[in-house]
Amino acid sequence: MALSIRNPEAERLAREVAAETGETLTQAVIRALEERLQRLKGRRRPADLVEEILRISKRCSSLPDMDKRSP
């Protein structure tokens, strides 16, 4: 399947990335899309973050109180 993008800004950006990296336009677009997809898959959902914070909080509250300055 061919991909045809007729957007001057998209073409300018692809050409700029290709020029900076020495890649072909196709390689530059593929790499950019791969990197973006990797970032998107790696980001945490808010629910996951809340769960992790709760786990950390529970673990911290179970630790002994080593600071005897406060009653």
Image (spheres, helix red, strand yellow):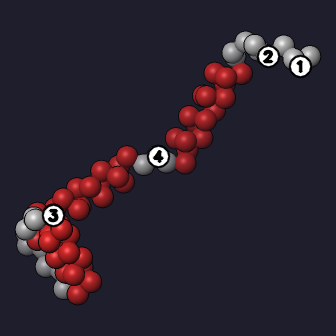
Label 3, label 4: how far apart the Cα atoms are:
29 Å
Left or right placement of residue 61 versus residue 9 in this view: right
N-terminal of the pair, mark 3 or mark 2, is 3
Q: What type is the residue that disc 2 sits on? A: Asp
Task: Give yes or no for contact between labels 2 and 4 (Cβ–Cβ under 8 Å).
Answer: no
Label 4, label 1: how far apart the Cα atoms are:
37 Å
N-terminal of the pair, mark 3 or mark 1, is 3
N-terminal of the pair, mark 3 or mark 4, is 3
N-terminal of the pair, mark 2 or mark 4, is 4
For residue 44, the mark is 4
Q: Secondary structure at mark 4?
A: loop
Q: How many marks?
A: 4
Label 2, label 1: how far apart the Cα atoms are:
7 Å
Q: Could you classify mark 1 by the number of other residues whose Cα lies within 10 Å: few (under 14), some (14-19), or many (20 or more)? A: few
For residue 70, the mark is 1
Q: What type is the residue that disc 3 sits on? A: Thr
